[in-house]
Image (tube, rainbow, N blue to C red):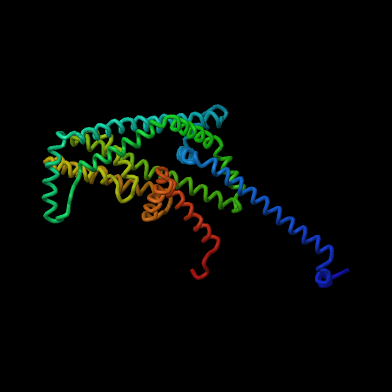
Amino acid sequence: MYSPVHIYAAGKNDIFSPASDIMKLMISGRIIEYVFFFGLLGFAGFLLWEMFMPFGTAVALAAIIATICYPIYERVRIMTPRHNSSVAALITTFLVVCILLIPLSILGMFIFREAAEIYSLVNKPDSSIALQQGIVNVEHIVQRVIPSFKLDLAGYIQQGARLITSNIAAIFTGTASTIFLFFLTLISTFYFFRDGKEFTKYLIRVSPLPDEQDSAILKRLARSIRSVALGTVLVALIQGTLTAIGFAIFGFDRFVLWGTIAAFGALIPGIGTSVVFIPAIIYLLATGSYLSAVGLSIWAALAVGLIDNLLGPYIISRGGTLHPFFILLSVLGGLAFFGPIGFVVGPVILSLFKVLIELYMAHNPNPSQ
């Protein structure tokens, strides 16, 4: 019998023996296998990424819709015969179309028509005489305090209307691509509903992290998506609706357009519905409608402001403990990097980063604390 010491000594003396050479060849062969495999995997992943990138927005939107509406899908599936997941996914996708996409399409057509009317109205020389005279009066008052103050309200309205009409026109004129992405979003939503649990199980199985950590990450992300959608989008829609009602009460035409602009402004922290209310109040003051200006100011502060300050933080706080400052940065950065869908993707990435830090701290506590 040989002890480990004898075996170690023999290994040192036979380091250049044929057996050692065979071991080296086996190790080098295994390294070559790993390099080839991961190189091939990386190349295939790169090609797959390039192929899927043109459809990234549609798939991401479908994933967000499926995550938000998944509780509805679960209820529908329970009510279907034999709990058929395909039938439940089809019904839920149809409900999404009826509740979300069709109203948004109709709203887009209304906005396009009203923006086009405003653009043509502002361009008429005889239609803005009272407005221009009122703006001059406001400028004279403000210039007593700020001499360099200049207000080109008509120009701002014209530029905004041109921007809206050009963007919405681009959406509806690109008929083929729009229809294709629309149906791709619906198909993706259907599969996310039906096979969402299988997708998450596969991600958990592939991930090198422990299963409980993967489950915690996925649950936190789903909760973050729902809280952002409810706390941001739903509150923005309520604010836009109240803005449209206020504009209709105080005599503004095309209140659907202004309510929609206010809803989009409400998605951006720090700006909110003031992007619409401030120019509208200035317009009322410039045209001598002082009572309406006071009434619209009160409406903006009470009906719209209370929704933003009370309902929004309450809903978002239920989805996590993200600091408002970081929510602001994540929304702005998401919009800049991902486009319109970034107002949800940005906070979700922030939530992912936060839960990873929390998992690290939970498994690596600081002894000094």
- The total of numbered circles placed on residues is 0
Q: Quadrant of residue 263?
A: top left
Residue 119 or 34: which is nearer the viewer?
119
> Horizontal and vertical percent for residue 299?
21, 42
Q: Residue at x 79, y 61 (%)?
A: 23
Name, please, the residue furthest toward the right: 1
Q: Residue at x 38, y 53 (%)?
A: 329
Q: Residue at x 30, y 33 (%)?
A: 111
Q: Is residue 87 above or below residue 233?
A: above
> Horizontal and vertical percent for residue 129?
13, 37
> Horizontal and vertical percent for residue 294?
16, 44
Residue 92 in sight = no
Quadrant in which the N terminus is drawn: bottom right
25 left or right of 220 in image? right
Residue 302 or 164: which is nearer the viewer?
164
357 left or right of 308 in image? right
Q: Residue at x 37, y 33 (%)?
A: 104
> Horizontal and vertical percent for residue 13?
83, 72
Residue 249 or 264: which is nearer the viewer?
264
Q: Quadrant of residue 242?
A: top left
Residue 219 in sight = yes
Residue 169 or 134: which is nearer the viewer?
169
237 left or right of 35 in image? left
Q: Is residue 123 above or below residue 11?
A: above
